[in-house]
Image (tube, rainbow, N blue to C red):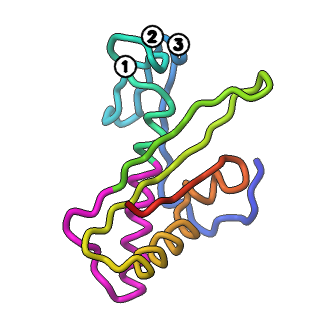
């Protein structure tokens, strides 16, 4: 296991059993709350793909990190706040890689306050930390 520091407490462990991979496979969590089919990106039919799952997980986690940052800044997140996540599966010189964008909408906020909040969230969000230095990331205010 590679980590930068040892955790003092494990808050939660997600357990998911996956078979069959991207093309017709499935994943199911041990508690039954997640039960999905997989499909290859861009193909017709039912199922989702790892890139969509990553986009959903990262954007939900990032919104939580924004909430923590907002409380520390003693401000409330606005009604109508939203994050549109985009995760690209890329091919470069025969190798697969990801790049990603979070497009954050904070209606009614001044740009400098919004930028400070998303920058703080990006420093604390576990997903952002996990991909830092490994995935090209843009965090845009829209």
Sequence-earlier tag: 1 or 3: 3
- Which residue is more in the foreground, 102 or 122? 102
| Residue denoted by label 1 | 47
| Residue denoted by label 3 | 20
1 and 2 marks in contact (CB < 8 Å): yes
Vertical placement of 70 versus 11: above or below?
A: below
In percent of width and height, residue 104 lies at: 39, 60
Number of numbered discs on residues: 3
Element class at badge 3: loop
Left or right of 87 in this view: 31: left
> Callout 1: few (<14), some (14-19), or many (20+) C-alpha neighbours within 10 Å?
some
3 and 2 marks in contact (CB < 8 Å): yes
- Which residue is more in the foreground, 20 or 137? 137
- What is the chief secondary structure element of the magenta stretch? helix
Element class at badge 1: loop
Vertical placement of 84 versus 10: above or below?
A: above
| Residue denoted by label 2 | 24
Left or right of 131 in this view: 76: left
> Callout 3: few (<14), some (14-19), or many (20+) C-alpha neighbours within 10 Å?
few
Magenta highlight on residue 114: no
Element class at badge 2: loop
- Which residue is more in the foreground, 135 or 19? 135
In percent of width and height, residue 113 lies at: 41, 81
Q: What's the residue at 44%, 60% (across, down)?
A: 62
In percent of width and height, residue 142 lies at: 37, 60
Magenta highlight on residue 78: yes
Q: What's the residue at 44%, 34% (across, down)?
A: 52
Outermost residue on the left side: it is 79
Write down the quadrant of residue 75 in the picture.
bottom left
Residue range highlighted in magenta: 58-82
């Amino acid at each position: 296991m590679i980590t930068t520091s040892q955790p003092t407490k494990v808050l939660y462990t997600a357990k998911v059993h996956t078979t069959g991979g991207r093309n017709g496979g499935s994943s199911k969590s041990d508690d039954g709350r997640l039960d999905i089919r997989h499909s290859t990106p861009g193909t017709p039919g039912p199922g989702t793909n790892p890139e969509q799952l990553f986009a959903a997980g990262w954007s939900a986690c990032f919104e939580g990190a924004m909430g923590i940052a907002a409380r520390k800044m003693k401000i409330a997140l606005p009604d109508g706040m939203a994050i549109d996540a985009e995760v690209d599966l890329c091919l470069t010189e025969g190798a697969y890689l990801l790049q990603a964008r979070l497009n954050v909408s904070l209606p009614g906020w001044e740009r400098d306050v919004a930028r400070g909040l998303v920058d703080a969230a990006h420093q604390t969000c576990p997903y952002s930390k996990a991909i830092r230095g490994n995935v090209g990331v843009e965090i845009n205010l829209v």
